[in-house]
Amino acid sequence: MTPYQELQSRLAETGYLANDSTAMALHLAQVLGRPLLLEGPAGVGKTEIAKALAQVLDTNLIRLQCYEGLDASQAIYEWNYQRQLLAIRADGTSEEQLFSEKYLLKRPLLQAISQETPAVLLLDEIDRADEEFEAYLLEILSDFQITIPELGTIQAKSRPHVILTANGTRDLSDALRRRCLYVYVDYPTQKEELAILSARMPEIGATLSKQIVHVVQAMRRDELEKKPGVAEMLDWAAALSGLGINDMTQTPEAVQATLVCLLKTATDRDAVPVEVLNRLLGKVA
C-alpha cells in the first residue's frame, strides 16, 4: 500500500471517503509542507476534509471562518486593551511591559503557528474575505511567520497543515494560488455517494439508499437555486430513517414533507412537487 493509499484508508476510518486525487493532494501537502486549496461548490465536503485530517493526525483543528471585512485583529492577533488599561491603573506598567505576550490575544493564525505540535489550520471560505486579507496570509503561507511591530517576527514553533476552502464566490489572487497545492472537489458520483451514505449510515437499507442517492443526483442536474450537498443528503437520509421509511414509493406525501432537508428556497420547493418526486423515484433501478 502506497503512503497516499494508507492516508486514504485512515481517512475512511473517520468516515470520510476521499478519492485518489484528494488523498494524493493531502499526502503531498504534508510531504512538501505546502498549503492545500480545495475549491468547489458548496456542500461537497471540503470542510469535512480538514476535520477528518485532524482526526487522522490526532491533532488540533484550528478554524478561521472567513467573511467580508475580516482583518488582522480578528484573524491574527490583537492587544488586550482592557487588561493593559487595568495594569496601567494598578501599578503604572511601562510601555515595554504592556506590549508583551502577556497582553497578546492570539487569534486563529497566530494560534496555529504557536502550537508545539503541528495543527490543522482551516481557512474556510477564503473567497468570502476581502482581497486585502489575502495579503495578510502571504507571509504566513510562504514562511510560516507573523510580524508584530511591537514584538518583532514570530517564527512558527511547528508548521501547521494548512487547508483553504473556496466556493467560487470570487477569483483568488495568483499570489495566493501559487503558494498552494490545488484540488477541485466536485459533487460525488452516484457510486461515491452511495459509498458515503453506506459508511455514515450503514443501518439504511439498500432500497432506500438507492432512492435517496438517485433523487439527490437528479436534483443536482436540475436548474435549482441551491443544489443539495452531501450534508443535506445525509440529513435527508437521517430524517427518512427516523420516520421508519424504507421505501419512498410507499409514502410519497410524507417523503415530500421531508424535502425541507434538501430544498432551501421557496422556488426550489415549488420546482419539486409530489408528481416530480414520484417520477424520479420511478426511474430508480
Image (cartoon, rainbow, N blue to C red):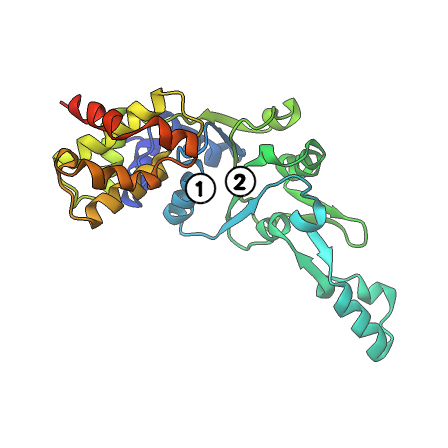
Q: Residues within 10 Å of mark 2 (few under 14, many from 20)?
A: many
Is 54 in front, or is 49?
49
Name the residue that disc number 2 marks: 124
Q: Is residue 223 visible?
A: yes
Is 174 in front, or is 280?
280
Q: Is residue 227 visible?
A: no
- Describe the element under mark 1 as helix, strand or loop: helix
* Sequence-earlier tag: 1 or 2: 1
- Quarter assignment of residue 253: top left
- Locate residue 31, reporting x and y percent: 46, 34
Name the residue that disc number 1 marks: 50
- Locate residue 273, reporting x and y percent: 29, 29
Is 130 in front, or is 15?
130
Q: CA distance from mark 1 to mark 2?
A: 10 Å
Query: Does residue 200 appear left or right of residue 126 in this picture?
Result: left
Residues at marks 1 and 2 touching, judged by CB atoms closer than 8 Å: yes
